[in-house]
Image (cartoon, rainbow, N blue to C red):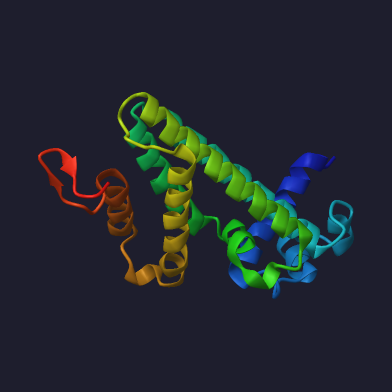
Amino acid sequence: MVDKEEYREKIILTASTIFSHYGFRKTTMDEISRALKKGKSSIYYYFGSKEEIFEAVVLHEANQLRSRLTKAIKEVDSPPDKLRNYIYVRMKEFAKLSNYYNAVFDKNLDHFDFIEKIRSRYDREELAILRLLVYVGNNRGVFAVENSEYTAMAIQTMLKGMEVPLFWRKREIDINDRLEAILSLIFNGILKKEEGLLLYG
């Protein structure tokens, strides 16, 4: 007897590989059913359309990312290490979770309502995490930040700015060097310090 939840997860994992390889538009239900070695009717029992499967795949990857980010933050204690871990894991996991990445950034998928919901939720959750990390660092006297909200938004903007060149030209770019440059900018800034005083502000 087939376990319904187990088979549903098998559909999601199989479809995830196919979507990653061919993209959402070029993937067909026939390809998914062939990979599962089942008739399409067995897939339609769980999902009404290719869009529904893609939504389940994206949500599955989103949960994976959330779990790995939470783990990365909890593994260390100091605020700089927490922020460093968050940024490293976030950028490296995006490279692996291609369906989630496409859902968040591919403009060709804009017409799907569930995509916009996923994007909005992703932005809100990330901003909340970054705000908390900055706030805790400030409270511990490690960071010198006047406004946690704006600082979190600035960090998020920097990370977003890295994504397109990083994933379109990833063979030519050393991700570690890019991440270190961002971390150096976040922690040290670009202005020269003289006798403990900033030249600006």
Position above or below: 93 against 196: below
Residue under the image location 72 percent in, 46 percent down: 9
Viewer-side residue, 179 vs 150: 150
Residue 20: percent from left, percent from top: 60, 64
Residue under the image location 89 percent in, 60 percent down: 41
Quadrant (top left, top right, bottom left, bottom right) of the N terminus: top right
How many badges with numbers are in the image? 0
Residue at the far bottom: name it: 26
Q: On the image, which quarter does residue 176 sit in?
A: bottom left
Q: On the image, which quarter does residue 99 sit in?
A: bottom right
Residue at the far top: name it: 140
Residue 181: percent from left, percent from top: 28, 55
Viewer-side residue, 11 vs 61: 61
Q: On the image, which quarter does residue 148 sit in?
A: top left
Q: Is residue 15 left or right of residue 177?
A: right
Residue under the image location 50 percent in, 55 percent down: 94
Position above or below: 32 against 80: below
Q: Is residue 107 left or right of residue 114?
A: left
Residue under the image location 45 percent in, 66 percent down: 167
Residue 82: percent from left, percent from top: 38, 35
Viewer-side residue, 41 vs 165: 165
Residue 56: percent from left, percent from top: 73, 52
